[in-house]
């Protein structure tokens, strides 16, 4: 069986992070291969693996590397298929690898997940494949429900330890909350239904959002766009998520403590691409709060203010099942003058 996901490690010393990805792909039943190739030490090998596997049916690449992690970027330079980057903490708690992975120039985006978050890299790769594969979506949904039950069980364990005389427990009806993510598959066949929802947390993010929408316009993607903050307008936000639940993926744009992406991920099992905006600290606050999501809920993070790369990642994801988008994407990339 040809693999659908190609995992490339910069070194065998990254294997403990790769194992987290492997465990998820085994649970989801998605075929994968694992290779060791370094962009710095063996760049011809990286190129060969990427070109041959892309031609032989690999749909998503996962690049896992520490230090000056150029590996995911070099994978992205050699393919129009989506590339997921997992930075590894070798020095500086992995911040060096995170910046090297995420801060890609326009044209070769890397959908970056949190430091050492191999499991989120695999979940994101599965979500991407799931855009056009209902079987994978269903399995992902099941996995997500297991997180719900785990959290409930953990809460029970803590409750047993609470013996203080002022501890007073209210019991909530929470069982009915489980399983709220239903897919409306019919809308996938409706050519007028938007493929993408672009959500900005504030009007002050508009200049970044415009970089995204300009590119989506250029390729002819149908998208919806909204400015809604889940913190300032929680009810409107919930209604918007409900109204757009049949899009294929979300792009969320936000600065400061970027809760917008986290809130979008909480409401959907579709891929969520995040763009951190540079408002304070040059956007490092938004980048870190966006990318370092807990296991189970990845955000495909792009570079700071990189609205165009967010659109490109979206196009790469959509091109897996749409020949016209693939054609437009290849033309666009081929015409880029650097
Ligand atoms: P060694 O343990 O082999 O010295 O590698 C690897 O991913 C690993 O995390 C130490 C770290 O160097 C990283 N490495 C890269 C690249 N190649 C190796 N970042 C690359 O091409 O980007």
Image (cartoon, rainbow, N blue to C red):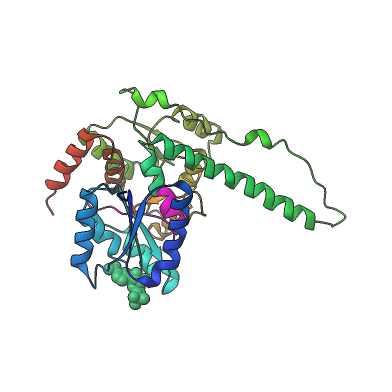
Residue 209, image quadrant: top left
- When the figure is inspected, residue 337 is found, relative to residue 212, above or below; the finding is below
Give residue 265's position: percent from left, percent from top: 48, 43
1 on left or right of 337 = right
State the extent of the magenta-drawn residues as a range.
106-124
Q: Residue at x 42, y 52 (%)?
A: 122
Q: Which residue is drawn at 30% across and 38% down?
A: 318
- When the figure is inspected, residue 183 is found, relative to residue 13, above or below; the finding is above
325 on left or right of 1 = left
Quadrant in which ligand 1 is drawn = bottom left
- Position of the C terminus, as image quadrant, is bottom left
* Residue 253 visible (yes or no): no
Q: Nearer the viewer, residue 282 or 215?
A: 215
Give residue 324's position: percent from left, percent from top: 20, 33
Q: Does the magenta stretch include residue 113?
A: yes
Residue 62, image quadrant: bottom left
């Amino acid at each position: 069986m040809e693999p659908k996901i190609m995992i490339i490690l910069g070194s065998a010393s990254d294997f403990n992070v790769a194992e987290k990805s492997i465990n998820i792909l085994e649970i989801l039943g998605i075929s994968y291969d694992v290779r060791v190739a370094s962009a710095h030490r063996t760049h011809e090998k990286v190129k060969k693996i990427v070109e041959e596997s892309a031609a032989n049916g690999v749909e998503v690449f996962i690049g896992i590397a520490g230090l000056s992690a150029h590996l995911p970027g070099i994978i992205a330079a050699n393919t129009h298929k989506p590339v997921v980057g997992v930075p590894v903490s070798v020095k500086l708690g992995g911040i060096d690898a995170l910046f090297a992975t995420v801060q890609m120039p326009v044209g070769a985006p890397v959908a970056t997940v949190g430091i050492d978050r191999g499991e989120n890299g695999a979940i994101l790769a599965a979500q991407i494949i799931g855009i056009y594969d209902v079987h994978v979506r269903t399995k992902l949904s099941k996995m997500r429900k297991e997180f719900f039950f785990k959290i409930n069980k953990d809460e029970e364990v803590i409750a047993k330890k609470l013996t203080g005389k002022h501890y007073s427990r209210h019991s909530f009806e929470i069982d009915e909350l489980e399983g709220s993510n239903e897919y409306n598959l019919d809308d996938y066949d409706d050519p007028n239904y938007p493929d993408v929802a672009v959500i900005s947390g504030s009007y002050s993010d508009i200049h970044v959002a415009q970089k995204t929408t300009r590119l989506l316009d250029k390729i002819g993607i149908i998208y919806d766009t909204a400015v809604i903050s889940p913190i300032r307008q929680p009810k409107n936000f919930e209604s918007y998520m409900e109204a757009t639940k049949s899009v294929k993926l979300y792009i969320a744009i936000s600065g400061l403590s970027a809760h917008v992406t986290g809130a979008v991920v909480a409401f959907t099992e579709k891929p969520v691409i995040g763009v951190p905006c540079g408002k304070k600290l040059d956007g490092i606050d938004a980048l870190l709060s966006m990318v370092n999501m807990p296991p189970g809920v990845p955000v495909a993070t792009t570079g700071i203010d990189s609205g165009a790369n967010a659109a490109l990642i979206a196009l790469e994801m959509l091109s897996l099942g749409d020949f016209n988008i693939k054609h437009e994407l290849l033309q666009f990339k081929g015409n880029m003058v650097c």
